[in-house]
Amino acid sequence: MSKFGKIKRQHGRIEGLDKLLDRIVRDCPHVLRVVPGRMGRKQGRTPERLKVQYETPGGRGKPCGLKCIYTRAGSWQEVFLICGDTPGAHRWMQEQGIVET
């Protein structure tokens, strides 16, 4: 494990994201590591939510994780979830009501 633990903390994160990411890495058996990505602003007030955009490709055509977008109060941030079992992680987050179905 790196010096930053399961969540890469070098990059900034928008308000509310840390609590959600801590829950995912603590409770989801399929998520190995979380890497927050780019942030941006959008007009209007967007509801707080995490949406899976797509599975990230790995070796031999198998997915190695999920690219998600977290939105809250006019801001958005990319979140990359590195998974041991990508479909299992996606299914777990849907069952927990963390991502939209």
Image (spheres, rainbow, N blue to C red):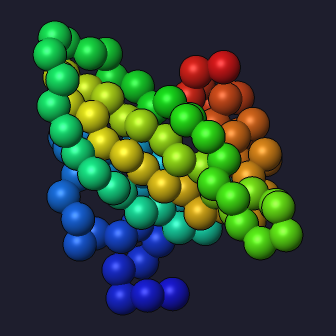
Is residue 36 or residue 3 the one in the foreground? 36
Question: In the rendered image, is residue 50 in sight?
Answer: yes
Identify the residue at image location x=26%, y=15%: 46
| Residue 2, placed above or below residue 8 | below
Q: Is residue 31 visible?
A: no
Residue 99 image point, x, y percent: 56, 28
Front residue (pair 16, 81):
81
Is residue 69 left or right of 15 when viewed as pictured?
A: right
Q: Find residue 40 and report its image quarter.
A: top left
Q: Of all residues shown, which one is farthest toward the top?
A: 44
- Image quarter in which the C terminus is found: top right
Q: At which x and y percent is residue 34? A: 47, 62
- Tell me which residue sits at (69%, 59%) in the image: 57
Which quadrant of the figure has residue 73? Answer: top left
Q: Along the horizontal axis of the image, is 31 left or right of 50?
A: right
x, y percent for residue 43: 14, 16
Does residue 83 lie above or below 23 as drawn?
Answer: below
Q: Is residue 44 above or below residue 97?
A: above
Viewer-side residue, 64 vs 93: 64
Residue 4 position (above or below residue 90): below
**Which residue appears at 37% of the width and 46% of the height?**
78
The answer to whether 98 appears left or right of 30 in the picture is left
Residue 38 coordinates in the image, percent (x, y) = 28, 51
